[in-house]
Amino acid sequence: MDWRKSFNINGGNNPLQAEIDHVKAKTQKGTNSYTNAQVLSKEQNLKKSDK
């Protein structure tokens, strides 16, 4: 099961809405595993760049 599809929080455009983010980006060979996931606010996730 893809954890990104199973995580659902209603928040709309709320900058504090929780989002699940990759610790290591998929473009950097990161996986969709729980061990490569972190919870960030929408605002934090938008500020994070693909490193």
Image (tube, rainbow, N blue to C red):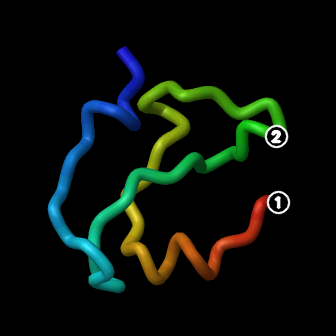
Position of residue 26 in the picture relative to residue 10 (left or right)? right
Task: Provide residue 28's location: percent of width, then percent of height.
Answer: 83, 40
Residue with the mark numbered 1: 51
Reply above or below: 25 against 31. Answer: below
Which of the numbered marks, if any, corresponds to residue 33? none
Residue with the mark numbered 2: 27
Residue at image location 71% in from the left, 45% down from the top: 25
Position of residue 49 in the picture relative to residue 8 (left or right)? right
Reply above or below: 9 against 26. Answer: below
Labels 1 and 2: the sequence-earlier one? 2
Between residue 35 and residue 40, name the one nearer to us: 40
Residue found at the far left of this picture? 10
How far apart, in angstroms, are the residues tagged by discs 1 and 2? 9 Å
Disc 2 packing (10 Å; few <14; some 14–19; many ≥20): few
Going by the numbered disc 1, the residue's amino acid type is Lys
Task: Provide residue 11's location: percent of width, then percent of height.
Answer: 20, 71
Locate the C terminus and report the quarter of the image it occupies. bottom right
Reply above or below: 23 against 19. Answer: above
Q: Quadrant of residue 5?
A: top left
Between residue 24 and residue 27, name the one nearer to us: 27
Q: Secondary structure at mark 2?
A: helix
Q: Quadrant of residue 16?
A: bottom left
Q: Quadrant of residue 27?
A: top right
Residue at image location 46% in from the left, 82% down from the top: 43
Locate the N terminus and report the quarter of the image it occupies. top left
Q: Closer to us: mark 1 or mark 2?
A: 2
Task: Provide residue 3's location: percent of width, then percent of height.
Answer: 36, 30
Position of residue 44 in the picture relative to residue 41 (left or right)? right
Q: Secondary structure at mark 1?
A: loop
